[in-house]
Amino acid sequence: MSGISSIVARENCESYLIFQGETGLGAGFRTFLYFLGLAYCFLGLSAITARFFRSMESVVSHSRKVVDIDPCTGAEVIRYEKVWNFTIADISLLAFGTSFPQISLATIDAIRNLGNLYAGGLGPGTLVGSAAFDLFPIHAVCVVVPKAGELKKIADIGVWLVELFWSFWAYIWLYIILEVWTPNVITLWEALLTVLQYAFLLIHAYAQDKRWPYFSLPFPRSERPEDWVPAEVVTGKHDTYPCNECSNILEVGEDENKNVVDIFSIHSESGLGPKYQKVPGIDETPEPSNKDFQENMISQDHHVFAIWRQQFVDAVKLESTESRKLKNIYLRLARILWQLILAPWRLLFAFVPPYHIAHGWVAFIGSLIFISAIAYVVTKLTDLISCVTGINPYVIAFTALASGTSWPDLVASKIAAERQITADSAIANITCSNSVNIYVGIGVPWLIDTAYNFFVYKEPLRIENAAGLSFSLLVFFSTSVGCIAVLVIRRLTLGAELGGPRLWAWITCAFFILLWLIFVVLSSLKVSDII
């Protein structure tokens, strides 16, 4: 009973979220309301994910004009090459962006904790729990996503091994600084080294991708798509705009909710109908005169404001063209109700500028700002849930917070597994997100707190439940070995990590979910002093 009481130790909670009258409500009703608010915040994260991926894809697809001289004829040869390297895009934009909810939550927790000699528990607990959610449930989803019999394998096994090494080393490093190097204490130099290792990961992965001598593994690279997001085959009789003729294709006049399901369709080379509008890219525009230049700028400004205005129209639209075609009135009403629930989020996120401005960077940063704001509300709600129910904050972090904040990771890997012809981005997002969680998600908040304590108190940062966190790392490391072993066995027997016969795909999925449940149960019992 004493162990169970350490998980739930209810006492009167005087904290509140919006107004003080909340404290007069019953504990059960308050708990229900706060969990409902937490779920609605996670729904907001899924809504902003669509805009985030749109902007990220625009950033990655950006190309630059390169002029070469033919050595034989002396003529100029013009070619276009991608600005972003695929591997760096996976590790930085994709992994960092999808892990941003956890990073924001941990950073906000650290800032709130400034002046305290002990580190906050929400950030590290959420990030370790998120790592387990990324590795097990997301792998489970990606394995069954491809069509029956379809196999998708990692094309560049060398890059994956580098990413996997740094992912495993991240958790070994965290255990070393928690239990071996300076037990239960984090120093300024340990936090700084943790953050710097993210730069080492980027350099090592880039060296492997470029096959630098002495820095890369001798693994050949098999087929890989020319584009980070391959074109989707769509049949239709509408007018088309080839992707290689314009730098941006923008969605106009259509409900954007379906983009959560298929966010990569903006680079399709097939007919997409009146939903899409060709906008001349700055890089591909020929040398204009001053008058032509001014006219082009005015035209582009007109496109920007027209599309931005359309975002607000789509945000309040409760019925899409597809839903109007439904004959089942109950299904149609259900969709309208769902759109009504999403409407506040969609209206709020309509303020994010169109993703073609500055090659998507403005929308990319704007999306991250909204994600940070939602993460702040999530931290407040989590504190209140812990206060009202008495549930150990680490338990909430391992379960609800880790699952909810990892939703963008799940969306990213699922769609990459569906759309891309290889498994590189789907699996790289998982392994790299785990690395980002430690090197950036834990490293940066600890760097903030250790720097403050070092310069103000001349004291290191102390970890209150270091034993529980270290135990979770050991459990995660042990179960992750089983996960990676299954992927290797699938590669050797089926020839690919994802897809394959439906029976074996579902068996793999069930095994990964079982590993996740083992991690959650054992970690929760340990931090609650039951085991």
Image: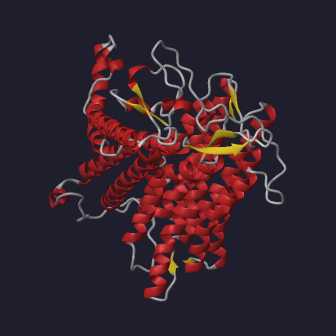
Q: Which residue is depicted at the point 57% across and 57% down? A: 436
Quadrant of the snapshot with the N terminus: bottom left
Please name whichever residue, 278 or 103, is drawn nearer the observer in this view of the structure. 278
Q: Is residue 370 left or right of residue 283?
A: left
- Can residue 515 be seen in the rendering of this structure? no
Left or right: residue 319 compared with residue 154 = left
Q: Residue at x 28, y 23 (%)?
A: 319
Q: Is residue 254 above or below residue 15?
A: above
Residue 402 position, x and y percent, is 48, 52
Left/right placement of residue 422 relative to residue 44 reads: right
258 and 314: which one is in front?
Answer: 314
| Residue 74 pos. (x, y %) | 74, 42
Within the image, what quadrant is residue 140 found in?
top right
Q: How many numbered circles are shown?
A: 0
281, above or below 167, in the image: above
Q: Which is nearer the eye, 30 or 496?
A: 496
Q: Position of residue 281 (x, y in %)?
A: 47, 38
Which image quadrant is residue 259 in?
Answer: top left
Front residue (pair 137, 393): 137
Image position of 105 with respect to 347: above or below: below
Residue at the image point whose x is 41% and y is 27% from the top: 276
Work out whether 498 lies above or below 114.
Answer: above
Q: Going 55% across and 66% down the picture, which residue do you hit?
A: 468
Q: Quadrant of the C terminus?
A: bottom right
The answer, for residue 457, to whether it is visible in the render is yes
The colour scheme is secondary structure
Left or right: where 212 falls relative to 429: right
